[in-house]
Image (cartoon, helix red, strand yellow):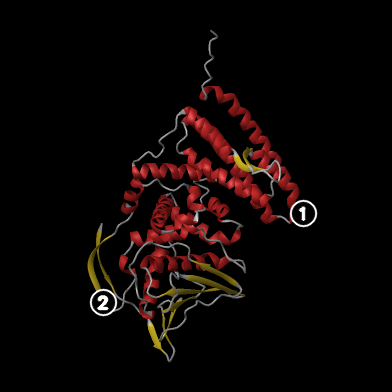
Amino acid sequence: MAICCWLALGRADAQPGADVLTARSASGQFLAVAPAGPGLSQPPGGRNGFTLNSTLQPNSDSKLPLDPSLLVISCERIKQAYLLTLGRRDQWRGSITLLINPAPQEGQSPVLTGEYDPKGWNYRLTLPSPIEPRLLFRAIVQALLMETANRRAGAQSAEVPLWLVAGLSAHLQAENLPIFLFRPESRLVSSQIGLPGLEPVRDQLRRRQPLTFQELCWPEPERLAGENYDLYAGCAQLFVDELLRLKDGHRCLGAMIDNLPLHFNWQTTFLQAFSPHFGRLLDVEKWWELVCVRFTDVDFAARFSPSDSWRRLQQALDVPVEVRFSPDRLPAQAEITLQEVIQTWEPARAEAALQRVAGKLLILRLQITPELRPLLDLYLSTVQNYLGDTRSGSAALPVKNFRPQLAGARDAACRKLNALDAQRAALRSQFVPLPVPTQAK
Protein backbone atom coordinates (compact mmCIF):
# COMPACT_ATOMS: atom_id res chain seq x y z
CA MET A 1 0.00 0.00 0.00
CA ALA A 2 1.39 3.42 -0.95
CA ILE A 3 0.05 6.85 -0.14
CA CYS A 4 1.01 10.38 -1.03
CA CYS A 5 1.40 12.72 1.92
CA TRP A 6 2.21 16.31 2.76
CA LEU A 7 3.17 17.07 6.35
CA ALA A 8 3.54 20.59 7.64
CA LEU A 9 5.50 20.98 10.84
CA GLY A 10 2.70 22.69 12.75
CA ARG A 11 3.22 25.07 15.68
CA ALA A 12 5.96 24.70 18.26
CA ASP A 13 6.91 27.78 20.25
CA ALA A 14 10.65 27.47 20.84
CA GLN A 15 11.87 29.54 23.76
CA PRO A 16 15.68 29.62 24.08
CA GLY A 17 17.00 30.49 27.53
CA ALA A 18 20.34 30.81 29.20
CA ASP A 19 20.43 27.18 30.35
CA VAL A 20 17.69 25.31 28.50
CA LEU A 21 15.82 25.18 25.21
CA THR A 22 12.08 24.55 25.43
CA ALA A 23 9.20 24.01 23.01
CA ARG A 24 5.50 23.48 23.71
CA SER A 25 3.20 21.54 21.39
CA ALA A 26 0.13 22.98 19.67
CA SER A 27 -2.33 21.30 22.08
CA GLY A 28 -0.28 22.33 25.11
CA GLN A 29 0.04 18.77 26.45
CA PHE A 30 3.72 18.30 25.56
CA LEU A 31 6.61 20.47 26.75
CA ALA A 32 10.08 19.51 25.51
CA VAL A 33 13.08 20.69 27.53
CA ALA A 34 16.75 20.31 26.55
CA PRO A 35 19.88 21.69 28.24
CA ALA A 36 21.74 24.21 26.08
CA GLY A 37 24.96 22.26 26.72
CA PRO A 38 26.07 18.90 28.10
CA GLY A 39 24.37 17.89 31.32
CA LEU A 40 21.66 15.78 32.92
CA SER A 41 23.60 12.52 33.00
CA GLN A 42 21.04 11.01 35.41
CA PRO A 43 17.25 11.22 34.97
CA PRO A 44 15.54 12.81 37.98
CA GLY A 45 13.41 10.64 40.24
CA GLY A 46 9.71 11.05 40.86
CA ARG A 47 7.70 11.73 43.99
CA ASN A 48 4.20 10.68 45.03
CA GLY A 49 3.88 8.49 41.97
CA PHE A 50 5.77 5.93 39.91
CA THR A 51 8.84 5.52 37.72
CA LEU A 52 8.86 3.11 34.78
CA ASN A 53 12.19 2.10 33.28
CA SER A 54 11.96 0.64 29.81
CA THR A 55 12.95 -3.04 29.75
CA LEU A 56 12.37 -3.60 26.03
CA GLN A 57 15.49 -3.09 23.96
CA PRO A 58 14.97 -3.01 20.18
CA ASN A 59 17.89 -4.29 18.16
CA SER A 60 18.87 -1.37 15.95
CA ASP A 61 21.87 0.87 15.41
CA SER A 62 19.86 3.76 13.92
CA LYS A 63 19.77 6.76 16.26
CA LEU A 64 17.74 9.95 16.09
CA PRO A 65 19.01 13.22 17.62
CA LEU A 66 16.26 15.02 19.52
CA ASP A 67 15.37 18.66 18.97
CA PRO A 68 12.69 20.19 21.25
CA SER A 69 10.73 21.92 18.46
CA LEU A 70 10.57 18.81 16.28
CA LEU A 71 9.99 16.43 19.19
CA VAL A 72 6.74 18.09 20.30
CA ILE A 73 5.47 18.01 16.72
CA SER A 74 6.24 14.29 16.52
CA CYS A 75 4.36 13.75 19.79
CA GLU A 76 1.28 15.54 18.47
CA ARG A 77 1.34 13.48 15.26
CA ILE A 78 1.61 10.24 17.23
CA LYS A 79 -1.21 11.35 19.53
CA GLN A 80 -3.46 12.03 16.52
CA ALA A 81 -2.93 8.46 15.29
CA TYR A 82 -3.46 7.12 18.82
CA LEU A 83 -6.76 8.97 19.20
CA LEU A 84 -7.92 7.94 15.74
CA THR A 85 -7.24 4.27 16.54
CA LEU A 86 -9.33 4.46 19.72
CA GLY A 87 -12.01 6.66 18.14
CA ARG A 88 -11.41 9.48 20.64
CA ARG A 89 -11.28 13.26 20.74
CA ASP A 90 -8.36 15.01 22.39
CA GLN A 91 -9.44 15.47 26.02
CA TRP A 92 -6.07 15.28 27.74
CA ARG A 93 -5.74 16.12 31.42
CA GLY A 94 -2.17 15.25 32.38
CA SER A 95 0.74 17.22 30.96
CA ILE A 96 3.79 15.34 29.62
CA THR A 97 7.19 17.00 30.00
CA LEU A 98 9.82 15.60 27.63
CA LEU A 99 13.24 15.94 29.23
CA ILE A 100 15.97 15.47 26.61
CA ASN A 101 19.17 14.05 28.05
CA PRO A 102 22.16 14.87 25.78
CA ALA A 103 24.63 13.01 28.02
CA PRO A 104 23.00 9.66 28.75
CA GLN A 105 24.79 6.80 30.39
CA GLU A 106 25.72 3.82 28.21
CA GLY A 107 22.60 1.83 27.32
CA GLN A 108 20.21 4.26 29.03
CA SER A 109 16.60 3.85 27.91
CA PRO A 110 13.57 6.15 28.30
CA VAL A 111 12.26 6.64 31.83
CA LEU A 112 8.62 7.61 32.43
CA THR A 113 7.84 9.22 35.78
CA GLY A 114 4.33 9.98 37.02
CA GLU A 115 3.59 12.45 39.80
CA TYR A 116 0.25 12.71 41.54
CA ASP A 117 -1.34 15.60 43.38
CA PRO A 118 -5.00 16.29 44.26
CA LYS A 119 -5.56 17.80 40.82
CA GLY A 120 -4.48 14.61 39.04
CA TRP A 121 -1.48 13.03 37.34
CA ASN A 122 1.32 14.68 35.37
CA TYR A 123 4.22 12.96 33.66
CA ARG A 124 7.89 13.40 32.84
CA LEU A 125 9.50 11.35 30.09
CA THR A 126 13.30 11.42 30.19
CA LEU A 127 14.75 10.61 26.77
CA PRO A 128 18.39 9.92 25.86
CA SER A 129 19.59 11.77 22.77
CA PRO A 130 20.28 10.39 20.25
CA ILE A 131 17.71 7.59 20.55
CA GLU A 132 16.60 4.62 18.44
CA PRO A 133 13.36 5.77 16.69
CA ARG A 134 11.25 2.75 17.57
CA LEU A 135 12.26 3.09 21.23
CA LEU A 136 11.18 6.76 21.16
CA PHE A 137 7.88 5.93 19.48
CA ARG A 138 7.06 3.29 22.06
CA ALA A 139 7.99 5.57 24.96
CA ILE A 140 5.59 8.25 23.70
CA VAL A 141 2.78 5.70 23.25
CA GLN A 142 3.41 4.41 26.79
CA ALA A 143 3.11 7.95 28.15
CA LEU A 144 -0.16 8.46 26.24
CA LEU A 145 -1.56 5.17 27.55
CA MET A 146 -0.66 6.02 31.15
CA GLU A 147 -2.18 9.50 30.81
CA THR A 148 -5.43 8.10 29.39
CA ALA A 149 -5.71 5.28 31.95
CA ASN A 150 -5.00 7.49 34.97
CA ARG A 151 -7.69 10.07 34.23
CA ARG A 152 -10.05 8.12 36.51
CA ALA A 153 -7.39 7.01 38.97
CA GLY A 154 -6.72 8.35 42.41
CA ALA A 155 -3.29 8.20 44.00
CA GLN A 156 -2.87 4.56 42.89
CA SER A 157 -1.69 4.44 39.27
CA ALA A 158 -3.24 2.07 36.75
CA GLU A 159 -1.37 -1.03 35.56
CA VAL A 160 -0.89 -0.94 31.78
CA PRO A 161 0.13 -4.37 30.44
CA LEU A 162 3.37 -4.69 28.51
CA TRP A 163 1.73 -6.31 25.47
CA LEU A 164 -0.52 -3.26 25.05
CA VAL A 165 2.42 -0.83 25.06
CA ALA A 166 4.49 -2.90 22.62
CA GLY A 167 1.55 -3.95 20.44
CA LEU A 168 -0.18 -0.58 20.11
CA SER A 169 3.06 1.28 19.37
CA ALA A 170 3.99 -1.30 16.70
CA HIS A 171 0.47 -1.07 15.26
CA LEU A 172 0.61 2.72 15.01
CA GLN A 173 4.03 2.65 13.35
CA ALA A 174 3.04 -0.02 10.84
CA GLU A 175 -0.33 1.44 9.88
CA ASN A 176 0.61 5.12 9.76
CA LEU A 177 3.30 7.38 8.37
CA PRO A 178 6.88 6.40 9.27
CA ILE A 179 7.86 10.07 9.13
CA PHE A 180 5.98 10.85 12.35
CA LEU A 181 9.40 11.22 13.94
CA PHE A 182 10.92 14.36 12.49
CA ARG A 183 14.65 14.80 12.14
CA PRO A 184 16.53 18.09 12.34
CA GLU A 185 16.31 20.17 9.15
CA SER A 186 13.01 18.48 8.19
CA ARG A 187 11.17 20.14 5.33
CA LEU A 188 7.72 19.94 3.81
CA VAL A 189 7.48 16.38 2.56
CA SER A 190 5.81 14.95 -0.51
CA SER A 191 6.68 11.32 -1.19
CA GLN A 192 5.38 7.87 -1.90
CA ILE A 193 5.57 5.80 1.28
CA GLY A 194 4.74 2.13 1.52
CA LEU A 195 3.13 1.12 4.81
CA PRO A 196 4.39 -2.26 6.04
CA GLY A 197 1.26 -3.26 7.96
CA LEU A 198 1.48 -6.85 9.21
CA GLU A 199 3.53 -8.34 6.37
CA PRO A 200 6.86 -8.25 8.27
CA VAL A 201 5.11 -9.98 11.19
CA ARG A 202 3.71 -12.66 8.87
CA ASP A 203 7.16 -13.37 7.43
CA GLN A 204 8.64 -13.56 10.92
CA LEU A 205 5.97 -15.91 12.31
CA ARG A 206 6.37 -18.28 9.39
CA ARG A 207 9.99 -18.74 10.48
CA ARG A 208 9.53 -18.71 14.26
CA GLN A 209 6.75 -20.13 16.41
CA PRO A 210 4.44 -17.42 17.83
CA LEU A 211 4.46 -16.70 21.53
CA THR A 212 1.65 -18.12 23.62
CA PHE A 213 -0.82 -15.81 25.32
CA GLN A 214 0.93 -16.61 28.59
CA GLU A 215 4.30 -15.55 27.14
CA LEU A 216 2.78 -12.32 25.83
CA CYS A 217 1.32 -11.43 29.21
CA TRP A 218 4.25 -12.42 31.43
CA PRO A 219 7.38 -12.51 29.23
CA GLU A 220 10.68 -13.75 30.57
CA PRO A 221 13.50 -11.14 30.43
CA GLU A 222 15.23 -12.98 27.60
CA ARG A 223 12.09 -12.45 25.47
CA LEU A 224 12.70 -8.71 25.55
CA ALA A 225 16.21 -8.42 24.13
CA GLY A 226 17.72 -8.52 20.65
CA GLU A 227 15.92 -10.57 18.03
CA ASN A 228 13.64 -11.99 20.70
CA TYR A 229 12.26 -8.49 21.20
CA ASP A 230 11.33 -8.37 17.52
CA LEU A 231 9.33 -11.57 17.97
CA TYR A 232 7.64 -10.21 21.10
CA ALA A 233 6.78 -6.91 19.41
CA GLY A 234 5.48 -8.70 16.31
CA CYS A 235 3.22 -11.00 18.32
CA ALA A 236 1.99 -8.08 20.42
CA GLN A 237 1.24 -6.11 17.24
CA LEU A 238 -0.74 -9.01 15.78
CA PHE A 239 -2.59 -9.46 19.07
CA VAL A 240 -3.61 -5.78 19.22
CA ASP A 241 -4.51 -5.70 15.52
CA GLU A 242 -6.79 -8.72 15.87
CA LEU A 243 -8.46 -7.24 18.95
CA LEU A 244 -9.19 -4.09 16.96
CA ARG A 245 -10.69 -6.20 14.15
CA LEU A 246 -13.31 -7.64 16.50
CA LYS A 247 -16.79 -6.15 16.36
CA ASP A 248 -16.56 -2.92 18.40
CA GLY A 249 -12.90 -3.80 19.02
CA HIS A 250 -11.85 -0.14 19.12
CA ARG A 251 -14.53 0.62 21.71
CA CYS A 252 -13.62 -2.46 23.77
CA LEU A 253 -9.93 -1.57 23.83
CA GLY A 254 -10.74 2.02 24.77
CA ALA A 255 -13.00 0.81 27.58
CA MET A 256 -10.23 -1.42 28.87
CA ILE A 257 -7.77 1.49 29.00
CA ASP A 258 -10.31 3.75 30.72
CA ASN A 259 -11.15 1.17 33.41
CA LEU A 260 -7.66 -0.08 34.24
CA PRO A 261 -7.56 1.90 37.54
CA LEU A 262 -10.78 0.23 38.74
CA HIS A 263 -9.34 -3.26 39.23
CA PHE A 264 -6.44 -4.91 40.96
CA ASN A 265 -5.11 -6.49 37.77
CA TRP A 266 -5.52 -5.77 34.07
CA GLN A 267 -6.88 -9.26 33.31
CA THR A 268 -10.17 -8.49 35.07
CA THR A 269 -10.48 -5.21 33.18
CA PHE A 270 -9.71 -6.93 29.89
CA LEU A 271 -12.41 -9.57 30.34
CA GLN A 272 -15.01 -6.98 31.31
CA ALA A 273 -14.19 -4.73 28.36
CA PHE A 274 -14.14 -7.61 25.86
CA SER A 275 -17.02 -9.53 27.48
CA PRO A 276 -18.97 -9.78 24.18
CA HIS A 277 -16.09 -11.87 22.81
CA PHE A 278 -14.40 -13.67 25.73
CA GLY A 279 -15.80 -15.13 28.92
CA ARG A 280 -12.54 -16.47 30.37
CA LEU A 281 -8.83 -16.09 29.76
CA LEU A 282 -8.90 -19.62 28.38
CA ASP A 283 -11.18 -18.33 25.61
CA VAL A 284 -8.57 -15.67 24.79
CA GLU A 285 -5.85 -18.32 24.61
CA LYS A 286 -7.88 -20.51 22.24
CA TRP A 287 -8.73 -17.50 20.08
CA TRP A 288 -5.07 -16.45 19.93
CA GLU A 289 -4.01 -19.95 18.87
CA LEU A 290 -6.48 -19.87 15.98
CA VAL A 291 -5.37 -16.34 15.02
CA CYS A 292 -1.75 -17.49 14.68
CA VAL A 293 -2.63 -20.53 12.55
CA ARG A 294 -4.97 -18.54 10.29
CA PHE A 295 -2.57 -15.60 9.98
CA THR A 296 0.48 -17.64 8.95
CA ASP A 297 -1.24 -20.51 7.14
CA VAL A 298 1.07 -22.75 9.16
CA ASP A 299 -0.19 -25.35 11.63
CA PHE A 300 2.22 -25.06 14.53
CA ALA A 301 0.51 -27.94 16.23
CA ALA A 302 2.86 -30.70 15.06
CA ARG A 303 1.07 -33.05 17.39
CA PHE A 304 2.58 -35.68 19.62
CA SER A 305 1.49 -39.27 19.39
CA PRO A 306 -1.23 -40.37 21.84
CA SER A 307 1.27 -42.06 24.14
CA ASP A 308 3.65 -39.06 24.05
CA SER A 309 0.72 -36.74 24.70
CA TRP A 310 -0.25 -38.75 27.76
CA ARG A 311 3.31 -38.69 29.10
CA ARG A 312 3.77 -34.96 28.47
CA LEU A 313 0.47 -34.12 30.13
CA GLN A 314 1.62 -36.02 33.21
CA GLN A 315 4.94 -34.11 33.14
CA ALA A 316 3.16 -30.76 32.84
CA LEU A 317 0.96 -31.52 35.85
CA ASP A 318 3.78 -32.73 38.11
CA VAL A 319 5.53 -30.06 40.19
CA PRO A 320 9.25 -30.84 40.64
CA VAL A 321 10.72 -30.49 44.15
CA GLU A 322 13.93 -31.37 45.97
CA VAL A 323 13.72 -33.77 48.90
CA ARG A 324 16.42 -34.13 51.57
CA PHE A 325 16.36 -37.39 53.51
CA SER A 326 19.20 -36.29 55.80
CA PRO A 327 21.42 -33.19 56.17
CA ASP A 328 24.52 -35.04 54.96
CA ARG A 329 22.99 -36.33 51.73
CA LEU A 330 22.41 -34.52 48.45
CA PRO A 331 18.78 -33.65 47.70
CA ALA A 332 16.80 -36.05 45.55
CA GLN A 333 14.46 -34.98 42.76
CA ALA A 334 10.78 -35.75 43.21
CA GLU A 335 7.38 -34.62 41.92
CA ILE A 336 4.29 -33.61 43.87
CA THR A 337 0.73 -33.03 42.73
CA LEU A 338 -1.06 -29.73 42.20
CA GLN A 339 -3.27 -30.59 45.17
CA GLU A 340 -0.25 -30.81 47.46
CA VAL A 341 1.01 -27.46 46.19
CA ILE A 342 -2.36 -25.79 46.79
CA GLN A 343 -2.90 -27.29 50.25
CA THR A 344 0.59 -27.11 51.76
CA TRP A 345 2.60 -24.31 50.15
CA GLU A 346 2.53 -20.64 51.10
CA PRO A 347 0.19 -18.65 48.80
CA ALA A 348 2.93 -16.67 47.01
CA ARG A 349 5.06 -19.75 46.35
CA ALA A 350 2.03 -21.77 45.29
CA GLU A 351 0.91 -19.03 42.90
CA ALA A 352 4.32 -18.96 41.18
CA ALA A 353 4.31 -22.76 40.78
CA LEU A 354 0.75 -22.80 39.43
CA GLN A 355 1.61 -20.06 36.95
CA ARG A 356 4.44 -22.23 35.63
CA VAL A 357 2.08 -25.20 35.31
CA ALA A 358 -0.45 -23.06 33.43
CA GLY A 359 2.30 -21.93 31.05
CA LYS A 360 3.35 -25.53 30.38
CA LEU A 361 -0.25 -26.54 29.69
CA LEU A 362 -0.74 -23.65 27.26
CA ILE A 363 2.34 -24.62 25.27
CA LEU A 364 1.40 -28.31 25.35
CA ARG A 365 -2.10 -27.47 24.15
CA LEU A 366 -0.70 -26.60 20.71
CA GLN A 367 0.82 -30.06 20.27
CA ILE A 368 -1.22 -32.53 22.30
CA THR A 369 -3.36 -35.10 20.55
CA PRO A 370 -6.92 -33.74 20.01
CA GLU A 371 -8.47 -36.53 22.10
CA LEU A 372 -6.69 -35.27 25.25
CA ARG A 373 -7.20 -31.57 24.64
CA PRO A 374 -10.61 -31.32 26.43
CA LEU A 375 -9.08 -32.88 29.54
CA LEU A 376 -6.11 -30.52 29.37
CA ASP A 377 -8.51 -27.57 29.06
CA LEU A 378 -10.30 -28.65 32.23
CA TYR A 379 -7.02 -28.81 34.15
CA LEU A 380 -6.01 -25.42 32.76
CA SER A 381 -9.31 -23.72 33.61
CA THR A 382 -9.23 -25.19 37.15
CA VAL A 383 -5.74 -23.79 37.78
CA GLN A 384 -6.57 -20.40 36.25
CA ASN A 385 -9.88 -20.10 38.10
CA TYR A 386 -8.13 -20.85 41.39
CA LEU A 387 -5.48 -18.22 40.66
CA GLY A 388 -8.18 -15.72 39.73
CA ASP A 389 -10.21 -16.42 42.86
CA THR A 390 -7.25 -16.02 45.20
CA ARG A 391 -6.02 -12.83 43.50
CA SER A 392 -9.39 -11.08 43.43
CA GLY A 393 -10.13 -12.13 46.98
CA SER A 394 -6.81 -10.93 48.34
CA ALA A 395 -7.32 -7.56 46.68
CA ALA A 396 -10.90 -7.07 47.86
CA LEU A 397 -10.90 -8.43 51.43
CA PRO A 398 -8.91 -7.78 54.60
CA VAL A 399 -6.46 -10.55 55.48
CA LYS A 400 -8.56 -11.87 58.39
CA ASN A 401 -11.64 -12.15 56.15
CA PHE A 402 -9.72 -13.55 53.19
CA ARG A 403 -8.30 -16.61 54.99
CA PRO A 404 -11.64 -18.50 55.15
CA GLN A 405 -12.28 -17.69 51.49
CA LEU A 406 -8.78 -18.95 50.58
CA ALA A 407 -9.43 -22.21 52.43
CA GLY A 408 -12.72 -22.63 50.55
CA ALA A 409 -11.03 -21.95 47.20
CA ARG A 410 -8.31 -24.48 48.04
CA ASP A 411 -10.82 -27.19 48.91
CA ALA A 412 -12.91 -26.55 45.79
CA ALA A 413 -9.87 -26.60 43.49
CA CYS A 414 -8.55 -29.82 45.03
CA ARG A 415 -11.92 -31.54 44.63
CA LYS A 416 -11.97 -30.62 40.94
CA LEU A 417 -8.38 -31.78 40.46
CA ASN A 418 -9.12 -35.09 42.21
CA ALA A 419 -12.04 -35.65 39.85
CA LEU A 420 -9.89 -34.84 36.82
CA ASP A 421 -7.15 -37.19 38.02
CA ALA A 422 -9.74 -39.98 38.30
CA GLN A 423 -11.01 -39.18 34.80
CA ARG A 424 -7.46 -39.25 33.45
CA ALA A 425 -6.74 -42.59 35.16
CA ALA A 426 -9.85 -44.07 33.56
CA LEU A 427 -8.59 -43.03 30.10
CA ARG A 428 -5.07 -44.35 30.58
CA SER A 429 -5.58 -47.64 28.77
CA GLN A 430 -6.64 -45.76 25.60
CA PHE A 431 -3.33 -43.91 25.35
CA VAL A 432 -0.68 -46.03 27.07
CA PRO A 433 -0.25 -49.48 25.51
CA LEU A 434 -0.31 -52.34 27.96
CA PRO A 435 2.94 -54.31 28.26
CA VAL A 436 2.97 -57.51 26.26
CA PRO A 437 3.17 -60.46 28.64
CA THR A 438 6.12 -62.77 28.14
CA GLN A 439 5.33 -66.43 27.62
CA ALA A 440 6.95 -68.95 29.92
CA LYS A 441 9.13 -71.50 28.22
Q: What residue type is labelled 2?
A: Arg
Quick check: can you spot residue 269?
yes
Relative to 78, 43 lies left or right: right
Tell me the distance, in whole angstroms, between the alpha carbons under discs 2 and 1: 65 Å
Quick check: can you spot residue 279?
no
Q: Position of residue 304 (x, y in %)?
A: 44, 32
Location of residue 371 with respect to 81 vertically, above or below:
above
Residue at point 31%, 65% (across, down): 178
Residue at point 50%, 54% (across, down): 220
Residue at point 65%, 35% (across, down): 416
Q: Residues within 10 Å of mark 2 (few under 14, many from 20)?
A: few
Helix, strand or loop at disc 2?
A: loop
Question: Which quarter of the figure has residue 59?
Answer: bottom left
Location of residue 190 with respect to 282 vertically, above or below:
below
Closest to the observer, 254 or 381: 381
Q: Which amino acid does label 1 sit on?
A: Lys
The numbered mark, 2 or 1, whose residue comes first in the sequence reads 2
